[in-house]
Image (tube, rainbow, N blue to C red):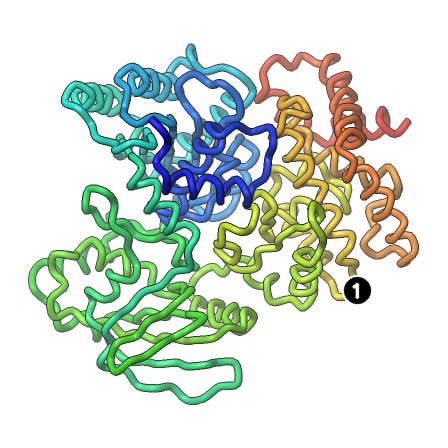
Amino acid sequence: MAMNPVVRAQLNSFKEANPDPERSDSDFFEVMSIFSVENGILGENNDPFRIHLKGEEFGIDGIAISIQGIICTDSDEALSILSSGKNHSGSFRIYQSKTSDSIDYGQISKFLDAVHDFFTDLNLLKGDQIEDLAGARDKVFSASARSNPELKCFFCTTGSGQVSDPIMDLINSNKKRLEELNIFSSVEIFCFGAKEIQEGYRAATQSSIATINFPKSITLPDHEEIDQSFIGYISADQIVKLSTTEDSKGNFLINRSLFYDNVRDFNPDSEINKNILSEISSGDHSSFVFKNNGITIVAKTISRRGDTFTIEDYQIVNGCQTTNILSQAKENLNNIFVPLRIIGSSNSDFISKVIIGTNKQNEVREDQFWALLPFMKDLEVYCAGQDGDRKILIERRDNQYRDISNERTRIMKSSDLMKICAAAFFFQPHRAARDHRGIRNEFSKKIFLPTHSVELYHVAALALYKFDYLIRTSRVNRSFAINKFYVLYSLVRKFWKTPDLLNAPQRSKEKVHREIMKIIMDNDVYSKFIEDVSLTINKIVDKSAIKTREQLRDYIRTEYFAENFTKLFFN
């Protein structure tokens, strides 16, 4: 049976936006399925290529390990997230996709066996990718003091997704088997067909848009950076309407992509939240509007017809706790009202200031402050304006590049740039992956300065993108992926001997930029460079007692190793 024509059209669009001539249609469908579920149905903002398993893993096409909503592919990334904050929440989402018109009993049995194996013996799943993910898995469980992580399993096809009675029995028995491991807060297994994939893909590639009834609104005073703004109070069911999505079973899910602050910090078991929910359940609805601080929404456009407001490309920048509480009390929303402020502005810098101003009581991410720097705006414009394969997208605002016409793997967050700078410009390849807090404290005042060169930041970001591309397309041995920060360090150290390139004379910066670009824009030359760095690392490791990939990861993160590598590689 031919692939569903709508899914085929969406797959073609996805392929055009993420070109890879060596990837088959079935591979692309695996990645697109992950994209549709993660960023469409679940409302995340994740790169599906980081979740997808490249190769023929037993029964599984993708594993998303998430801490505080951030994807981790190894223990370094997990530890980096865990180094900040506390009471971290984790989740696992595991994928299998088939370009078939029905759900095959044997295939889903194999899938669920592989899921069980990932959390137990690792007899069926092998290889460097699995070892790296297992390292991240272990860090999630080690940080699960507050609550166990959740598990969601997704089996996707291009058919109807209809589940027969024997397959439902299989799913239920495997759900019980996974629950009996006693390591998850919840276990869910989903079978999605063409309809769910289509709807998820549309949701993932379209700007957020909602229409609400806001009769108790007052126009706020004029401001040069604001197109329109309103304040008032609104019925709670309208808040739930604009902040949730509905899954195939009719359940409401919080649309995480709409929130600035971390929606996963919501704890329904906290005494404050339990008391609020208890008051709502008891019928005390009219007092809610007096006790609640309200919600602030920023939108690029606001269209108003009477009391009906249509808002597009919007974010809820304050009101995470309120929204979660209301979504949990959706059966008791009658006569509950919430203070609301809607701000319409297309000025990204002003929006960032609003976000920071309305979250003073919360920990504001340093990324948000960086987003306001004039240099970051210049860097964003410069990187996006590069031709063809040199283009990089600097994401200064969450979901800034949601449109599918942009290649997902070219998007760089401020946190990515921080790690790149640590390795390439400050010569700290051993710390870049893991020492998140230390790197920020030491170097945050030395990056993104007005006197710095946008060309250098661009070439370093491009070098990381090209490295990942060569790994992803199997032009470089996947086992070398662990060495990426040593590669970035070596690219700069080859042409500049000291960790002060950002402040070097302009002609020197231009020369280093030119020499690095010569290497990374030639796939054969760059592949050879990566191999040379990796073979040097292997020579040092071979003289040690290292046996496992996790031991290797710890070893190359030491200052002792970094010093030995520098002596050997640059001898």
Task: Tell me if residue 180 comes above or below residue 206 in the rendering.
Answer: above
Callout 1: helix, strand or loop? loop
Q: State the image quarter where residue 107 is shown.
A: top left
Residue drawn at x 78%, y 29% is 524
The one nearer the camera, 33 or 102, is 102
Image quarter in which the C terminus is found: top right
Image quarter in which the N terminus is found: top left
How many callouts does the rendering have?
Answer: 1
- Residue projecting furthest to the left: 283
Please state the horizontal and vertical placement of residue 215, each as a whole percent of the image: 22, 80
Look at mark 1 in the image and give the residue it sits on.
451
Residue drawn at x 52%, y 71% is 353
Q: Let me know if residue 493 appears in the view.
A: yes
Answer left or right for 17 relative to 261.
right
The one nearer the camera, 371 or 391, is 391
Which kind of residue does numbered mark 1 sit on? Thr
Please state the horizontal and vertical placement of residue 148, each as a whole percent of the image: 32, 34
Task: Tell me if residue 99 comes above or below residue 263 in the rendering.
Answer: above
Q: State the image quarter where residue 389 is shown.
A: top right
Please state the horizontal and vertical placement of residue 349, each as a whole percent of the image: 56, 70
Q: State the image quarter where residue 553 is shown.
A: top right
Answer left or right for 112 relative to 395.
left
Q: Let me know if residue 67 appears in the view.
A: no
Residue drawn at x 75%, y 48% is 459
Please state the horizontal and vertical placement of residue 570, each as a whole percent of the image: 88, 29
Answer left or right for 168 relative to 72.
left
The one nearer the camera, 325 or 42, is 42
What is the crowding at mark 1: few (fewer than 14 residues within 10 Å), some, or many (at least 20)?
Answer: few
